[in-house]
Amino acid sequence: MNLSHLRYFVELAHTKHYTQAAAHLCITQPSLSHAIAQLEAELGVPLFEKDGRAITLTRFGEQFLHCVQQSLDTLDEGVSAIQRVVRGEGMIRLGLLRTLGIEYVPSLAAQFLKNNPGKNIRFTFHTGTTQQLLEDLLAKRCDLAFCSQPPPSMGLTAVPVQEQDLVLIVPRDHPLTAKHTVTLADTLPYPQVFFSKSSGLRNVVDRLFEQIDGTPNIAYETEEDQVIAGLVAQGFGISVVPYMELLLRLNVKILQISQPAWERKFYLVSNPNTYESPVVRQFIQFVLGTETL
């Protein structure tokens, strides 16, 4: 069914006058008459009938007008939505580690909105472990992820954008509190609260212990660094964690690790096999222009 003919039908149904409708549509009256005749022939029923010098809709025309108007409105809204996307508007779905949701990612999003006044740009924020975020990225449930570096086998694109020191935290009454700095070897005699294997930090910490040929005494495992900090504060063990302001409010002592030296990097991760809308590409350019290491 010809889309132009449907629009001609709606215009004629509203004006009820061939000459006026043709003028509004910027076509000739014979072209309009031919289009309506084709539409009626295709449907098999008359859509208009004469009423003196005017025309009115038949009962079939009234029923058809309701359906056509709804369909055209839906189509026009869809076209408008796509045009807004092309103009750099729309949704940006972000996945992020919880530790990056306290300040880093919210400040980036707020500044990006400030740099794009008048545009209809919205964000969604989803937190999780690195493994969960990378799975969401592959499943196209998010557009971008801020997390630890993905393994090369996943085929994702990752650019370092932020870094964070790793520190040792111990309960306030722990023997190591007498020290100001420690080596990782100093931690080996004590039970440790470790990141679970689903956490992106697990590989980082494992590699640190490999460098000193040491085997940590793992007493507990969990995914979230904030949960680990809470467990350490309650005496469940000691732990190597990224530095965060939360640690200052807990009953733990923060010790610098002098050997081996290490910094945790966070990455902006994207899926090269997924179409990136203009607004997502603009946000990537903004982040990389602001935060690349």
Image (cartoon, rainbow, N blue to C red):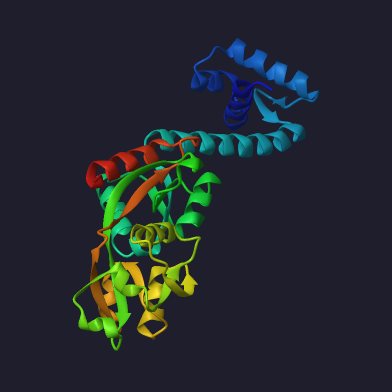
In the image, taking residue 60 as reference, residue 238 lies left or right, namely: left
The image quarter containing residue 258 is bottom left
Q: Nearer the viewer, residue 90 or 97?
A: 97
State whether residue 69 is above or below residue 175. Answer: above
Residue 191 appears left or right of 11: left
Residue 33 placed where, x, y %?
65, 15
Image coordinates of residue 232 in percent, x first then y, are: 37, 80
Is residue 107 at all visible to an observer of this figure? no
Out of 28 and 196, give the one closest to the viewer.
196
In the image, farthest residue toward the left: 180
Residue furthest bottom as drawn:
173
Residue 98 is at least partly visible in this image: yes
Q: Residue at x 63, y 21 (%)?
A: 5
214 over 25 or under it: above or below = below
Where in the figure is residue 240, as x and y percent of width and height? Answer: 34, 69
For the point 29% across and 58% down, the residue is: 104
Residue at position x 35%, y 49% in the image: 267
Q: Image quadrant of residue 107?
A: bottom left
